[in-house]
């Protein structure tokens, strides 16, 4: 169900049964009665036909020959719970606002459908934008459990600035029930709510299965990430450096990430036609993404030199 108790729905595109994409939709997050409001909050509280991104652009432009995922089957998990797809809790924010943070249950139901429809997939791409980007590496680990012999590639689109802050991690866990969904992988033994943050989604999944491949896209001064940083209470004014520091943290733990850092304040790339026109330092994003999906190892990072904040 969605945050307000309404029915949840997801969408499926049947194409190549061996090449499959599991997509986690974005759409904000909430932490308080104001941000979680069903009428004036920071996220959508329902799903429906409008969540079908077919024809929206980017990786959903299935008629574009430049789209490296045009022939793939898709299962898309819309987002209506304010908990970046990892929630498992009912929280009362005020006398008249009770939120069903049901994101993990919803996305897991969509993932179960993917496995039921495409049990013989040999390549699975787990992609997410914005809020969906946060959970993409985590679900990459769950996909690798379902498909132990498949090539699993994660593409996290626009969440690279969010750090691992013990206070924020614990607060989110308390509100959303996020720590209750931590898998019982051996690498997670002893981990605490304070240690379960956004970079750890990469670290723990990558240590659990070193064959999972990870990629990230960000704009260096993403205005949406900046606004949610302010909402969550951490300083992201030097966002380009924060993005680089988070990647350094992930790779220092032994998990390699291929990254593409573009200049400016835009937010997300996978669902927009700019995916086909964006270039940084002479490297077109669509060519970089195509190379990443075809490769079996990390590919070279691309990073803006003059990063903005304006394009």
Image (cartoon, grey):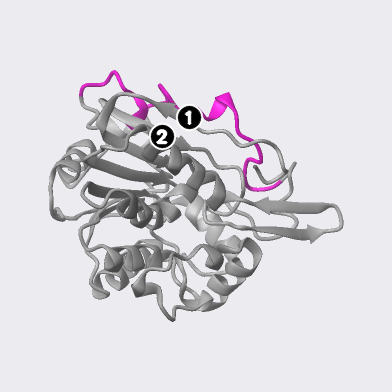
Task: Characterize the local packing of mark 2: few (<14), some (14-19) or many (20 or more) Cα atoms within 10 angstroms.
Answer: many
Are dots 2 and 1 in contact, CB under 8 Å? yes
Label of residue 75 in the image: 2
Q: Which one is in front, 40 or 307?
A: 40
185 lies above or below 222:
below
**Image position, residue 237 (x, y; %):** 46, 65
* Residue tagged 1: 11
Instruction: Find the distance from the CA under tag 2 to the CA under tag 1.
Output: 6 Å
Which quadrant of the structure image shows residue 13?
A: top left
Give x and y (percent) for residue 249: 31, 73
> Does 27 lie within the magenta span?
no
Read off the magenta span. Answer: 41-65
Return the residue nearer the eye: 16 or 63. Answer: 16
Residue 277 seen from this side: no
Name the residue furthest bottom. Answer: 190
Q: Earlier in the sequence, mark 2 or mark 1?
A: 1
Report the disc number at residue 194.
Answer: none
Residue positioned 40% across, 50% down in the render: 158
Question: Is 210 rendered above or below residue 249?
Answer: above
């Amino acid at each position: 169900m969605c945050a307000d108790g309404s029915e949840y729905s997801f969408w499926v595109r049947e194409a190549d049964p061996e090449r499959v994409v599991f997509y986690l939709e974005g759409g904000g997050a909430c932490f308080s009665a104001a941000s979680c409001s069903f009428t004036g909050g920071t996220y959508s509280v329902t799903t429906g036909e409008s969540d079908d991104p077919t024809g929206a652009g980017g990786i959903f432009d299935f008629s574009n020959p430049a789209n490296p995922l045009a022939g793939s089957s898709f299962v898309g998990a819309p987002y209506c719970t304010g908990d970046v797809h990892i929630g498992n809790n009912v929280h009362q924010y005020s006398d008249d606002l009770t939120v069903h943070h049901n994101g993990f249950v919803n996305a897991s139901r969509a993932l179960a459908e993917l496995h039921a429809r495409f049990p013989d997939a040999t390549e699975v791409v787990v992609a997410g934008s914005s809020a969906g980007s946060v959970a993409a590496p985590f679900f990459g680990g769950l996909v690798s459990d379902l498909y132990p012999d498949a090539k699993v590639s994660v593409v996290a689109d626009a969440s690279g600035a969010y750090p691992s802050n013990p206070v924020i991690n614990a607060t989110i866990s308390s509100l959303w029930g996020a720590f209750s969904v931590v898998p019982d992988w051996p690498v997670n033994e002893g981990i605490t709510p304070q240690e379960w943050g956004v970079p750890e989604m990469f670290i723990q999944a990558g240590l659990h299965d070193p064959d999972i491949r990870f990629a990230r896209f960000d704009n260096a001064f993403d205005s949406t990430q900046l606004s949610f940083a302010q909402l969550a209470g951490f300083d992201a004014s030097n966002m380009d450096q924060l993005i680089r520091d988070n990647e350094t943290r992930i790779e220092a733990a032994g998990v390699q990430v291929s990254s593409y850092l573009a200049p400016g304040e835009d937010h997300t790339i996978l669902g927009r036609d700019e995916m086909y026109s964006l270039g940084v330092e002479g490297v077109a994003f669509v060519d970089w993404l195509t190379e990443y999906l075809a490769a079996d190892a990390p590919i070279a990072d691309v990073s803006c030199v003059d990063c903005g904040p304006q394009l």
